[in-house]
Image (cartoon, rainbow, N blue to C red):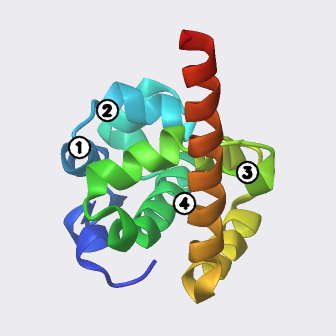
Amino acid sequence: MSNSEFLSDVSDQHGVSPRRLAAALRTAESELAIVAWVSPEALTKAARIGSVTPQSQLVEICGIIDRIIPWAASAPTAYAWYRSQSLPSFGDATAEELVRQGWSNKLHAYLDRLKDGGFARFWSAMLRAIALAARREIRVNY
């Protein structure tokens, strides 16, 4: 994990704190359990919070959200992107789906490409798709 402000804010002596992470993302711990693909008890019972599986899942989620915050301007917006933004390069899967499928390394490589200038191409493609969808809606409404 990097030494970012976000990561320090959501961590405690045991690793990533589900309570702090939920507060930073403005969501419930039960939703974090769904996103991290662990049982709700794994994030609420003191004996299980520090175990390997929940911590590895939370660290992965935090690492990706941390990389998106500079583009999204806030942790809750980055979290919304993580959960809902379809990524054309991955067959419109979301970052959440990619992490769940074990493709975190491919997602990180994708984010590296965006950081190195692919971002403009990404948004250009998104704007074309939005314009095309708008034209279709106009035709349907007439």
Which residue does the numbered mark 3 point to in the structure image?
Answer: 88
Q: Cβ–Cβ below 8 Å for labels 1 and 2?
A: yes
What is the spatial separation of the Cα atoms under label 4 and label 3, in whole angstroms? Answer: 21 Å
Residue 78 found in image quarter:
bottom left
Task: Work out whether mark 3 precedes mark 2 in sequence or the reverse, and give the earlier one.
Answer: 2
The mark closer to the camera, 3 or 1, is: 3
Which residue does the numbered mark 1 point to in the structure image?
Answer: 19
Which residue does the numbered mark 4 point to in the structure image?
Answer: 60
Task: Work out whether mark 3 precedes mark 1 in sequence or the reverse, and give the earlier one.
Answer: 1
**Mark 3 secondary-structure assignment:** helix
What is the spatial separation of the Cα atoms under label 4 and label 1, in whole angstroms? Answer: 16 Å
What is the spatial separation of the Cα atoms under label 3 and label 1, in whole angstroms? Answer: 33 Å
**Whether residue 17 can be seen here:** no
Q: Amino acid at mark 1?
A: Arg
Mark 1 Cα shell of 10 Å, populated few (<14), some (14-19), many (≥20)? some
Percent x, y for residue 44?
Answer: 32, 32
Task: Work out whether mark 4 precedes mark 1 in sequence or the reverse, and give the earlier one.
Answer: 1
What is the spatial separation of the Cα atoms under label 1 and label 2, in whole angstroms? Answer: 6 Å
